[in-house]
Amino acid sequence: MVARLRVCLLGACLLFYAELTSAQQGLTLQEASRRSVNNSPELQIFQWRLQAMEGLRQTAGLRPQLGLGIRAENLLGTGEYSGTERAEYTLSLSSIIELGGKRQSRLGVADSRYALAEIERRAQALDLLGRVTQRFVTVLALQEKLQLSQEATRLAGLLLQSVRQRVEQGATPDAERLRAQAALTQAELAHSAIEAELASGKMSLATLWGADEVDFGALSGDLYASQAARDFDALFEQVAASPAIQLLATEARLRQAELELVRSQSTSNLGWSFGVKQLEESGDSAFTAGMEIPLFSGARNKGDIKAAMAARTSVDYRKQASLLELRARLYAAWRFHQQAVAATQQLRQSVLPALEVALVQTREAYERGRYRFVDLVDAQQELLHARLAAIDAASAALLNQALIEQLTAEPLAAVDQSAPASSE
């Protein structure tokens, strides 16, 4: 009994450790994407749409229905036809023979509609993953801004301490202490505002997988992991294989199948009937047979063919327009990504180190009375603004990289590189 209890306690401890480790690691982009794809209501709809398409295909494959008919003639009239003695009864079986490949055309349309629904599901999934990436990067940037606001609050506190010492020494007026106190309060307010914005961003991310509350802590990712994009022409070549263009290509095949179906209607179906006639007056019976074919079906179908051809041609022009629009969007994202990556590197490698050194030297000079209070405040603000600019540039680089990879149907992998999770 004691041994079993020890095993249970050990298992519980291991489970708790695993959950604690997972919580410390934070939510990754890969996990957020998996949750969204598995639980998003907008993707679950396609399961039922595809089942509906399968049902429509079954219906499209049905052959013409048989009909059973009974007909009575020469009864309940006048004179010698007043009764049923001279009545004639016919029992017949009838149907039609489809000509012009109508059944195969119907199946072709059904298959094309199913394929279109599949491509729409892929396009919707890619769009969902794009939104997951965008919101993930936004929250990741807010985590960095929260750390920056903590640093701003700490610097404001240090500034207030320095000013108080100088006020006590009589080296500076008390008004500067009041200004430093106000600066600290403003930094605390800014920190609270970012906390609220971060909570809202997390909730916005969680809704993508149908959660009604935030079910994760910090995000795990590297905001500065953006990679240089490839040549623009090479990227644009991949757009042709993206779901957005495949969707139009599949729609073109659907319109072509619909056109073939409409053309098949120009060939008239052949109706037939076969039956037995009973002659009541003589007691004899005889077989009956008949055939029927509508006239001028081709002429009556010209309008529908014209409409189907117009619908088919319009898809080609829509594809051309979509390619032009995608090219413009891809080029804008590519250029903005390049600029943001370059700005991030320059800020982190050149601007921030220089401003950090300048702040240390300005604080030392202020404490010796060589610099004014406003000089120290300016040095702190310049450093904080540069750090904020680096965060915004890194965020812009990742967001544009996400858009590039969404347009070219490639996953975003850079954000998920191993990095310590930013904490609140």
Image: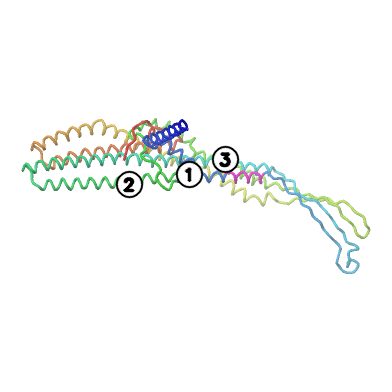
- Chain part drawn in magenta: 50-60
Q: Crowdedness of circle 3 by 10 Å Cα count: few (<14), some, many (20+)? A: some
Estimate the x, y position of residue 250 in percent, counting from the top left.
55, 40
Along the horizontal axis of the image, is 179 left or right of 51? left
Q: Crowdedness of circle 1 by 10 Å Cα count: few (<14), some, many (20+)? A: some
Q: Can you name the residue that lies furthest to the left here?
A: 170
Along the horizontal axis of the image, is 378 left or right of 100? left
Q: How is the image coloured?
A: rainbow
- The quadrant the C terminus occupies is top left
Q: Dot 2 corresponds to which residue?
A: 197
Counting residues from the N terminus, which is met first, the one under dot 3 or under dot 2?
3
Amino acid type, residue under disc 1 in the picture: Ser
Q: Which mark is residue 115?
A: 3
Along the horizontal axis of the image, is 369 left or right of 291? left
**Local secondary structure at mark 1:** loop
Q: Which mark is residue 40?
A: 1
Estimate the x, y position of residue 297 in percent, counting from the top left.
69, 50
Amino acid type, residue under disc 2 in the picture: Glu
Counting residues from the N terminus, which is met first, the one under dot 2 or under dot 1?
1
Estimate the x, y position of residue 162 in percent, counting from the top left.
13, 40
